[in-house]
Image (cartoon, rainbow, N blue to C red):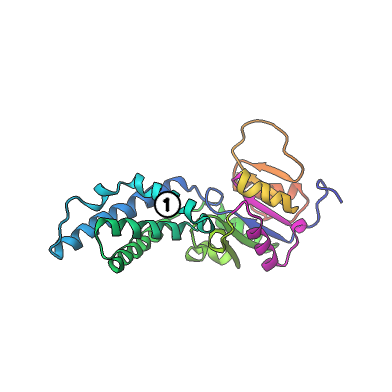
Amino acid sequence: MTMTDPLPLQAITFDLDDTLWDNHGVMVATETGHYAWLDRELAGWLQAHGRSTSPRFGECFPLESFELRRRALAHAHPLHRGHFTWLRERALTEMLGEYGLEPATAEQWARAAMARFMELRHRVEPHPEVEPLLTGLGRHYRLASITNGNVDIQRLALGRHFPVAIAAGEIFAPKPDPRPFLAALARLGASPARALHVGDSWREDVEPARRLGMQVAWISPHVDDTPMPPGIHRLDHVRELPALLRRLGQPAPEWELR
């Protein structure tokens, strides 16, 4: 049996951001939206409590300083480097304390800001092909999601397609660490040779999955005709996955948008 004659697939694992939906616009709106919310609501709370609102939090700590603080925390706490929710809340708590809030109040406002962040973060719009694609795939394969991001797939309608969902940062093993893949495969009851991973990042999706012996569908807009290594299949879009499965001699959903 060779990589051009693969074993029958049992399982398919999916990255989420920029694989099942476009993520850039979501992150821009989420980043700016929750930070503006914090600046506005905190100023109103301070004013209501007879406390100075000048300068405002956002003036003392522009959004760029929030990013720098998260990077510094990731460097200081390498175990948490991929736990983006923890990094964000910890950074906000520190900055709010430096702004003058008491520790308990700073923690309370940081939690509130992160609740707003998570609300905005889940306003993703999956590609229109994704829902029928997952429905069809679920009839033939065991499905799992593996993400470095902080989207909780169970908060989305798509979550019903993923009985296994791995948030790599929360298990302190962000991709390209192989452990999220191994955890997903163990819970799916599938070996790497009987599994396909679908993702957009060469470093975080293709390389670790391939090293484990998985087939990989790399979602990357077509640039040239450079041949891919055996077992790696470049697709322009996730909608092309059924056609790839058929080329590999595997079951595929009957539908295919053209």
Please say whether residue 14 is visible from this viewpoint.
yes
Tally the numbered discs: 1
Vertical placement of 234 versus 46: above or below? above
Q: Position of residue 238 (x, y in %)?
A: 60, 48
Q: Is residue 206 magenta?
A: no
**Over which residues does the magenta segment extend?**
175-201
The quarter of the image holding the C terminus is: top right
Classify residue 39 by image quadrant. bottom left
- For residue 38, side relative to residue 55 (left or right): right
Regarding residue 125, the answer to whether it shows in the image is: no
- The residue positioned farthest toward the front in the image shown: 76
Q: Position of residue 23 (x, y in %)?
A: 47, 48
Q: Is residue 196 magenta?
A: yes
**Mark 1 Cα shell of 10 Å, populated few (<14), some (14-19), many (≥20):** many
Q: Amino acid at mark 1?
A: Arg
At 69% from the left and 49% from the top, the residue drawn is: 216
Pick the residue in front: 235 or 36.
36
Give the residue drawn at x 56%, y 67%. 160
Q: Is residue 212 left or right of residue 117?
A: right
Horizontal and vertical percent for residue 123?
A: 42, 56
Q: Is residue 23 left or right of residue 93?
A: right
Q: Which residue is mark 1?
A: 70
Q: From the viewer's perspective, is residue 41 above or below residue 176?
A: below
Q: Nearer the viewer, residue 27 or 86?
A: 86
Foreground residue among 95 and 21: 95
Going 38% across and 52% down the picture, which residue do you hit? 30
**Extreme left residue here?**
50
Identity of the residue furthest to the top in this view: 224
Question: Of 180 and 226, which appears nearest the observer?
Answer: 180
Expressed as whole percent of the image width and height from the top left, the position of residue 193 reads 77, 56
> Dot 1: what SS?
helix
